[in-house]
Amino acid sequence: MVKKTSQQETATAVVVDEDELSADPEEDQTFTDLSNKLAEIRKDKGVIGYILRNTTSATIDLKEPEKIVEYALFSSQVLDSSREISDLFELDDVESIFIEGKENNALCMTIDGNKISIFMEKDADHADILKRISP
Amino acid sequence: MNNEVYALALKSTLQEIQNACPDVTSNFIFNDGKILAQDKNTNEETATQTIAPYNAIAERADILGGLETITIQSAEGKVNITTINDFHLTTVSSNEADEKYVNTLTRILIPIVIKLVEQIQPASTDNETITIDQTEPEEEDTTEEIVDEPNVDATEETVDETADDDADTENYQPYEPEEETTTTEPYEETEPAEINYEPLLPEPPVTQLIVENLSGFRVPSDTVRVDTEVIAQWNELYSDKKINEVEVEALNGKTTRCKFNPIKKSKDTGKGIIKMPEKIQLTLETVAGELVTVKPVVE
């Protein structure tokens, strides 16, 4: 069964490669659960937005939709490079990555194949967000 | 040049951080794509390979206004890379590590060391100016700089000879040791092979002691006896260095260097006295009951 999900609160197109579409129901359920959690977190003061994606679906909700590509590239780069660094020091699977920027912060993680990036202001409580999103 | 000064100071600091937190498995600092300092547990190749993925993230971090810190929490430990004054400090620790303690140490110690090195830099900055002059083929200028130094009148002949022989300019040997050693030091420092990575020693502490007579049949005339507590402090401060002599200065400014031994009698320890043979008292023009200052000569 091929399914394509795209919840776009910013009316920005999300491209999904049709060839890769093959989600199992369990993965689909995790995606839905995470999507609901993120929608709740998004309401928090200080949360700028988030990107949630797996091999079949993606949900993006950002304050600045015109910068969606930059956010997506950053998110992807953080997850890839962090795995690389973790492998170098033989630290096993990456659980979460917290990036402190000069203006904003970001929290990235992978849960059951779902890649999550949450962008927030400096004063947002990232530990609390991590707790709420973690299984 | 600057990086070498930083490396020296930072390497010791990193090692101390690891000593203080055994849960820190590796820590190193990179700057401009090169490893600047690392602790002894860090594999240089691994450290070098960390730079590329870090830079890849940093390049995309404009949406956050630039990258300050990245913390990767993995199943078996965590990696933290923090930017401090253009230096990137990487700390790899186990999950058992007290994050707050490690962060407090690293984020306070490293900036302090960097700041201290920057404050010490003015001397090095002067050196660099001369270094640049030397690398330029204008050897006459280099010679002129030496000539312009004060107290050179007495050495004019030597300087003229040096100026005549351009090829020998770099091998110029200072005539007056005290004044011109400082002038010629920069030339020595420009050679990387001569960089000494020994840790910086603290300034010798100056202790004020009261002179007491030391006489006897088998008392060596060139040796003073110093309070054992004072010697213990020196040994603590310079644990791995040998102290064979002390420099004693009398109130009138006269100084002498001599050997020393601890005061033998236990009743005299902790009283702040220095036992001195008559010969040394005469040299210093001091007498029993007067104050002198003593500092260790660290070899």
Image: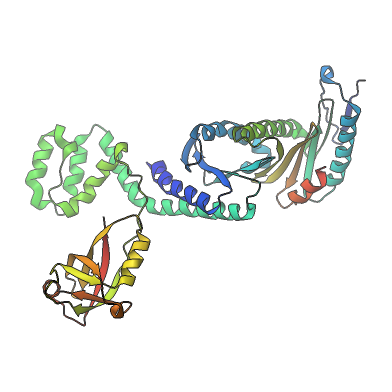
Give the colour scheme shown.
rainbow
Quarter location, residue B163: top left
Residue located farthest toward the bottom when viewing the structure as drawn: B289
Report whether A90 appears left or right of B28: right
The number of numbered badges drawn on the structure is 0
Report whether A83 appears left or right of B291: right
A50 or B226: nearer the viewer: B226
B64 or B201: nearer the viewer: B201
Residue at 87 percent across and 45 percent down: it is: A40
Q: Is residue B89 visible?
A: no
**Quadrant where the image shows the N terminus of chain A:** top right
x, y percent for residue A12: 83, 30
x, y percent for residue A10: 84, 35
Residue at 89 percent across and 31 percent down: it is: A26
x, y percent for residue B151: 14, 54
B191 or A132: nearer the viewer: A132
Q: Is residue B241 visible?
A: yes
Report whether A19 appears left or right of B170: right
Q: Image height check: is B217 above or below A55?
A: below
Residue located farthest toward the top when viewing the structure as drawn: A19
Residue located farthest toward the right when viewing the structure as drawn: A1
Q: Image height check: is B207 above or below A47?
A: below
**Quadrant where the image shows the C terminus of chain A:** top right
